[in-house]
Amino acid sequence: EPGGLLYDCDESLRLLVQAIADQHQPAMLARVPSHLPVAGQLRLASGGRGVVHTSGAPASRSVEIGSDWTAYFALLSSQRRYDLRRAQRRAGEMGPLDVRIESPAPEAVEPLFGEFVRIEATGWKARNGTSLRRRDTLRRFFLDYCIRAARAGTCRFAFLDIGGRAVAAQLSVEWQQ
């Protein structure tokens, strides 16, 4: 969603937006950039029976880091630096720390994705029943998406290991470098 809806031609976009409009339910696509043709297509599909609101909010949160980590870290507030150092120290007390960033080949996606799903299911999403482990359709969708992104060379998995066990994970797709 941060890059817009996925479609390969104008007709696909029209059909996708029409399917959204045909639900006759409010739809919030908060992170679809307003400069993309989705808003115009939604207005057409709703036939004037709906409200389409757009804003100039960024598609996704990002932090521009135009320097190395040391220089970036120095720019953070003293409280933020303290919090990060304390978290790193506390994690280090549990075992050696390691950060892994994987850019997998398509055949290597499934075990990495399984590790990601395991970690995701240990936090608040598990308590709320919204983890991928409990949502088969969404899990299959993201696995397929990751395999396709790996074919394009844009899939990234990042893991924080403590004592040789992954305890935190992030799934990313590189977009526009």
Image: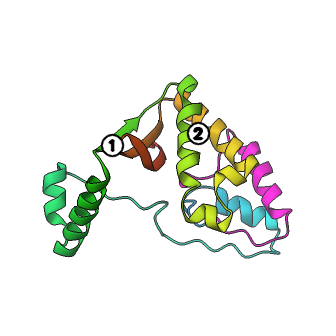
Secondary-structure class at tag 2 = helix
Residue 177 in view in this figure: no
Point out the stretch of residues depicted in magenta.
2-29
Residue 114 in view in this figure: yes
Q: Quadrant of the C terminus?
A: top left
Q: Residue at x 52, y 36 (%)?
A: 112
Instruction: In the rendered structure, find residue 114 and report the number of the disc placed on it.
Output: 2
Splitting the image into 4 quarters, where does residue 36 fall? bottom right
Residue 171 rendering spot, x and y as whole percentages: 49, 46
Residue 1 rendering spot, x and y as whole percentages: 59, 54
Residue 162 rendering spot, x and y as whole percentages: 35, 47
Instruction: In the rendered structure, find residue 62 and report the number of the disc placed on it.
Output: none
Amino acid residing under circle 2: Gly
Q: Residue at x 59, y 39 (%)?
A: 114
Amino acid residing under circle 1: Val
Q: Marks 1 and 2, Cα distance to the nearest angstrom?
A: 18 Å
Q: How is the image coloured?
A: rainbow
Secondary-structure class at tag 1 = strand
Q: Earlier in the sequence, mark 1 or mark 2?
A: 1
